[in-house]
Amino acid sequence: MLLDHLNSKRDVGLAKHGFAHYMETERVDNPEYAYIDDTEVLTGAALDAEWDDETNTIVWQEYSGKALQDFLSGSVLYAVPREKWQPREESLVDRFFKEHPQPTWFEDQLRVALDDHAGIEPDADEDDLWQNLDLDS
């Protein structure tokens, strides 16, 4: 089941952190979700899920044997064929700031705070002049 299409490890980390937070807090604390099991929650979060009209359920991709071990070990880089992978044009954070513009300094601070809260190292920017600054000199 595909939960999201993302372009970078940073976006994956933020999405993973957000979904884990949802599952551990809102999912547990909100009475509206008390009757829903985790399978139904994941089904609701799936993107472009394949629907089985006969059983009225989402079709799950099943792994067993070596395919399962490869997937769990992380040696399989993509769980969906590349031709079905359709990443967002921009990250959720970029889209937020596009819809809700902030002063540059505040946007930078919020991005760093989001990364820090999620335990994410920001993507390296080769053009960033600060990365070459030697603070020990």
Image: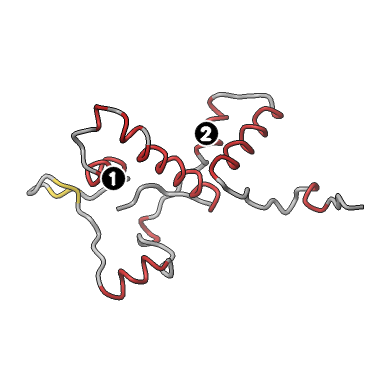
Foreground of the two, 85 or 23: 23
Residue at 18% in and 34% down:
35
SS at badge 2: helix
Foreground of the two, 116 or 124: 116
SS at badge 1: helix
Horizontally, residue 66 falls left or right of residue 96, namely left
Q: In this view, does 45 lie above or below 98?
A: below
Residue at 51% in and 51% down:
7
The image's mark for residue 108 is: none
Which residue is farthest left?
54
Where, by quadrant of the figure, is residue 41 drawn? top left
x and y percentages locating residue 52 in the rendered image: 14, 50
The image's mark for residue 42 is: 1
| Viewer-nearest of discs 1 and 2 | 1
x and y percentages locating residue 55 in the rendered image: 8, 48
Foreground of the two, 47 or 130: 130
Where, by quadrant of the figure, is residue 22 drawn? top left
What's the residue type where badge 1 is placed?
Answer: Leu
Horizontally, residue 108 falls left or right of residue 90, namely right
**Distance of label 1 from label 2 (alpha carbons):** 24 Å
The image's mark for residue 95 is: 2
Residue at 31% in and 35% down:
28
Residue at 47% in and 49% down:
6
What's the residue type where badge 2 is placed?
Answer: Arg
Horizontally, residue 111 falls left or right of residue 52, namely right
Instruction: Specify few, some or many for label 2: CA neighbours under 10 Å numbering under 14, 14-19, or 20 or more.
Output: few
Foreground of the two, 72 or 50: 72
